[in-house]
Image: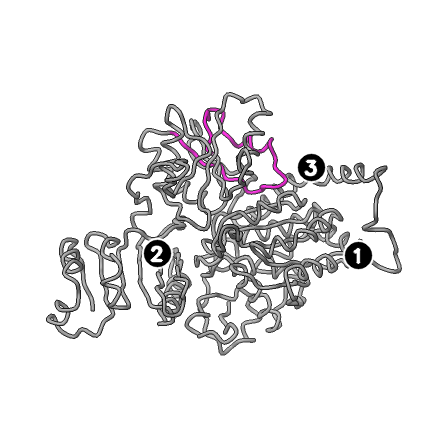
Amino acid sequence: MLSTLNHGRSLAVTTARSLAVPAQTAAVAGSSRHFAGKASPSGGEWQTMDGCTAVCHSSYAMMDTAFIYPITPSSPAAELAEQWSALGVKNAFGDVPKITQMQSEAGASGALHGALAAGSLATTYTASQGLLLMVPNMYKIAGELLPCVMHVAARALAGQALSIFGDHQDVMAVRQTGFAMINADTVQECHDMALIAHLATLRARVPFVSFFDGFRLSHCIEKVDTLPYNQMRRMVDMKALNAHRARALNPNRPYVRGTNENPDVYFQQFEASNSFYDKTPQIVKEEMDRVGAVTGRHYDLFQWTGPKDAEAAVVVLGSGASVVEEALPYINSQGKKVGVLKPRLYRPWSSEDFLKSLPKTVKRIAVLDRTKEPGSLGEPLYLDVASTIQESDRTNIKVIGGRWGLGQKEFTPRCVAAVADNLYSQYPKDHFTVGIDDDVTKRSLPLNEELNVSHPKTVECLIYGYGSDGTVGANKNATKIIGDNTDLFVQAYFAYGSQKAGGLTMSHLRFGPEPIKSYYAVNKADYVGCHNPTYLDMYRMTDHLKEGGTFCLNSPFTSVEEWNKHVPAGVRKALAEKNAKVFN
């Protein structure tokens, strides 16, 4: 495992992003600081990394070439692949992939189409409007049944305003292109689903979009079990790979492709692709089983978590599914029977597998979409679930829809509790929103006090920093050191103001003995750090400190008199009432 400089950024920042590369390449950057990753049960290494790095680890192994154009929040994955290529890091086949930065996302997708037609294993990384610029070529790639994977850090689209933050508007806008769609719920799954997509696309000949939540997963640092490249190489279907190579455009084996078709044959030709899409769910399931046999992490097309005799279910994609799963023990301890059904493969949609995974006892379903389609009867996932139920023999199930997390609005355990309460109400609100107070159209669910559902031994930290003061870089390094050198699981997420340098930064850190599924801000912290004393007058930091917690102030105060003079009385009172341990 390597950590290298990233286009002149400070070492403190860049060492937190691990370059998860085969061990034999470590000598290439021998001067870089690195920590020895611990062996994992799968035969790989536990490495502390963010979602983009996890995706890059899997995709780099399976590519010959990539065509990239940077766009937040997918840029780190593309930049990392470019760095590894420049360092001479080899993929799973023993070759150094060629990475080409294009002039736009449209150019990247056009070059991707050409490389695939030439028999290459090609990929790209994108998000938001960048993905939309690829739509014309996506239709061509899918129509010509060219196996590839596009890795998308799902992000909001610029509508009434620009937002660089995560939701599912972009990926839902391309669900009709003919690409299969697979998604991740955790940073570990970013690694696993990317690998599964690359393995499945070769066999299915259907191209894939492998998407994961922008920022919440793409930039969240966690401990990941990374598979070694020699193990990945053994999982590739070489017959399918050789068949893809053999279909490459070649003047010695000419054939017609991409013609103009008239009404006499166009419809029939389009329908002829049905058999490929019909086989795709089973192929993905088989690849999930193969990966599970190696890693011990077993996935299904639709993953059920909760009571086997559940009365209600929540269906949700992305990191929100992990939050729902984390909140279920508390919700079910209140007398409810609620579970979560997590779709792994969103396209092609398999109604048969959905119904097989849904307990027979479920009578109400809440479907949560992370997108909005103005003027539609409902959002995409809701319509898929409603159609599945309507066409089945289980039409007694009531299906309601809701929206969450647009523009990365926080989705916390109390939001899950509100959804569960709505499901159990006599007249459940349909087409609701959760996580906001909709004082215009009155569609939001009421929220109660925040719930603390994390593991009792998980330590949570909240650190307020000043943009460019080194706080974020130091916290990334601290998280990486703990993750790489202890048995603890870690999670680090960093929120920045729009100013970045000179603005507020907030570091949300968690450390615990079990995998962490808390994909939301730290609300009650064991440790609160303030790295700029002026923040004492600006933010109510002590509200987030647990009883008996630790408060650390970075300040020039050298005596009790100075402390009492400059620290607001309200802060001193709150610290005393919480019996806090105070450091300066």
Q: What residue is disc 2 on?
A: 511
At mark 3, the secondary structure is helix
Q: What residue is disc 3 on?
A: 278
Residue 14 is situated, as x and y percent measured from the top left of the image, at: 46, 70
> Compared to 9, does 323 lie above or below?
above
Q: Amino acid at mark 3?
A: Asp
* Proximity of marks 3 and 1: CB atoms separated by less than 8 Å: no
Instruction: Measure the C-alpha gap from mark 3 to mark 1.
Output: 24 Å
Residue 391 is situated, as x and y percent measured from the top left of the image, at: 60, 25
Which stretch did the figure color magenta? 337-366
Q: Classify residue 241 as left or right of residue 348.
A: right
Q: Nearer the viewer, residue 41 or 331?
A: 331
Say if the magenta span includes residue 132: no
* Among the two numbered marks 3 and 2 on one chain, the one whose residue lies closer to the N terminus: 3
Query: What residue is at 66 percent from the left and 60 percent from the top?
Result: 63
Instruction: Measure the C-alpha gap from mark 3 to mark 2.
Output: 43 Å
* Among the two numbered marks 3 and 1 on one chain, the one whose residue lies closer to the N terminus: 1
